Image (cartoon, rainbow, N blue to C red):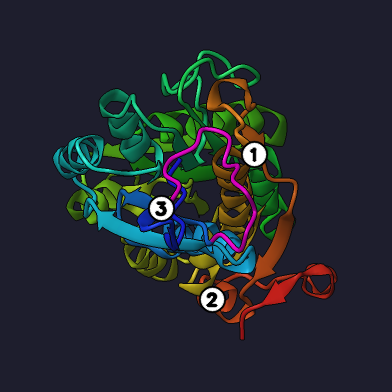
């Protein structure tokens, strides 16, 4: 931790005594009007509303706490090689803490950065991704917050809006562990709902249109929190409207962009939660190794009646009345 104080000069008996304080592991000091500030790096995998919201929420926690931060924000533009390069740059830099946003960015940061705390957010399964020993006892310098979605509840929305639905299409990135976890959960839930999951994989967002087409005719699409898919979710919206297939999202940003409905987490609040963990590390001396991975309990029902209509579906009034947010 870096603790910077204004140096106070005192002149006595012909000598000058300069009093200053530098880094302290417990964040302590004499409390005499000290001003804390930190240098924090943020490595975000790609730009899209959910990840942007998580990063902003993280920064908001510091602003609300009145803590000064010198931010170094980097975006990998969806490229793993860029995420690796950013992580290596941060590892060689003078940082107090690093935030990695999304699983591939977190994996790169965890591998490269060992000398300062690394927090992650928007990671579905930290254990499966190899980021922690266990969610309860991370065991290293890495911990953070999970955005594991209530996949079963989200898939059930297909039946709530389209009771006769038999097939649900899912496109996801073959290289994203978090996406595979969600698809596996969707397959398990589909058995109870009596629907078949049709899946296709992509390596990057430019392949999305072709992958959607390869699914053939389906009654609905489900969009997991897959970074390549979400960054080009307009392609999914166009397919849903063209094929009159319901589009169910996994977070609010997707519904704002044209999905019909979701019941998901608030990424701004998830980012704030991660920021609170960071403050405990920097100010209270908490160790990432002993801080369990946290999840969000804030679920929001978000509906977009206009988008649903374009997909040939009407959202029941009961769900509109129940919604936390109705996109007009």
x and y percent of residue 220 in the render? 52, 53
Q: Earlier in the sequence, mark 3 or mark 1?
A: 3
Q: Is residue 15 visible?
A: yes
Q: Earlier in the sequence, mark 3 or mark 2?
A: 3
Query: Going 55% across and 20% down the picture, which residue do you hit?
Result: 289
Decide whether residue 305 is among the magenta residues.
no
Asked which quadrant contains residue 196, the reply is top right
x and y percent of residue 12 in the render? 45, 58
Quick check: 88 left or right of 125?
A: left
Label 1: element kind: helix
Label 2: element kind: helix
Number of the front mark, 1 or 2: 1
| Span of residues in magenta | 20-34
x and y percent of residue 133 in the render? 51, 13
Q: Are marks 3 and 1 in contact (CB under 8 Å)?
A: no
Q: Are marks 3 and 2 in contact (CB under 8 Å)?
A: no
Q: Residue 29, labelled with which disc?
A: none
Asked which quadrant contains residue 282, the reply is top right
Q: Which residue is mark 2?
A: 307
Number of the front mark, 3 or 1: 3
Q: Which residue is mark 1?
A: 284
Q: Are marks 1 and 2 in contact (CB under 8 Å)?
A: no
x and y percent of residue 153 in the render? 71, 44
Q: Residues within 10 Å of mark 1 (few under 14, many from 20)?
A: few
Q: Residue furthest front?
A: 13
Label 3: element kind: strand
Query: Going 77% across and 69% down the picture, which residue do you hit?
Result: 323
Q: Which residue is mark 3?
A: 17
- The quarter in which the C terminus is drawn is bottom right
Query: Going 18% across and 41% down the picture, which residue do you hit?
Result: 89
How far is disc 1 from disc 2 in space, using C-alphas? 47 Å
Q: Residues within 10 Å of mark 3 (few under 14, many from 20)?
A: few
């Amino acid at each position: 931790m870096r603790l910077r104080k204004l140096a106070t000069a005192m002149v006595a008996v012909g000598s000058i005594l300069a009093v200053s304080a530098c880094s302290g592991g417990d964040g302590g000091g004499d409390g005499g009007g000290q001003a804390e500030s930190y240098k924090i790096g943020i490595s975000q995998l790609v730009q899209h509303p959910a990840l942007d919201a998580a990063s902003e929420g993280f920064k908001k926690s510091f602003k609300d706490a009145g803590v000064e931060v010198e931010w170094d924000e980097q975006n990998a533009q969806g490229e793993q090689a860029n995420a690796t390069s950013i992580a290596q740059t941060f590892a060689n830099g003078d940082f107090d803490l690093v935030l990695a946003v999304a699983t591939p960015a977190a994996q790169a940061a965890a591998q490269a950065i060992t000398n300062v705390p690394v927090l992650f957010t928007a990671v579905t399964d930290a254990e499966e991704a190899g980021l922690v020993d266990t969610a309860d006892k991370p065991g290293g310098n890495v911990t953070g917050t999970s955005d594991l979605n209530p996949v079963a509840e989200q898939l059930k929305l297909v039946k709530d809006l389209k009771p006769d639905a038999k097939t649900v299409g899912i496109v996801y990135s073959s290289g994203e562990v978090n996406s595979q976890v969600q698809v596996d959960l969707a397959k398990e839930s589909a058995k109870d709902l009596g629907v078949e999951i049709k899946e296709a994989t992509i390596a990057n967002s430019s392949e999305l249109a072709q992958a959607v087409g390869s699914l053939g005719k389906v009654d609905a699409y489900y969009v997991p929190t897959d970074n390549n898919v979400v960054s080009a979710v307009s392609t999914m919206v166009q397919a849903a409207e063209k094929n009159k297939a319901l589009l169910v999202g996994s977070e609010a940003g997707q519904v704002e962009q044209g999905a019909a409905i979701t019941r998901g987490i608030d990424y701004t609040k998830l980012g704030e939660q991660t920021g609170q963990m960071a403050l405990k590390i920097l100010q209270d001396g908490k160790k990432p190794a002993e801080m369990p991975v946290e999840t969000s309990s804030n679920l929001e029902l978000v509906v977009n009646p206009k988008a649903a209509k374009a997909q040939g579906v009407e959202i029941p009034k009961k769900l509109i009345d129940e919604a936390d947010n109705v996109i007009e």
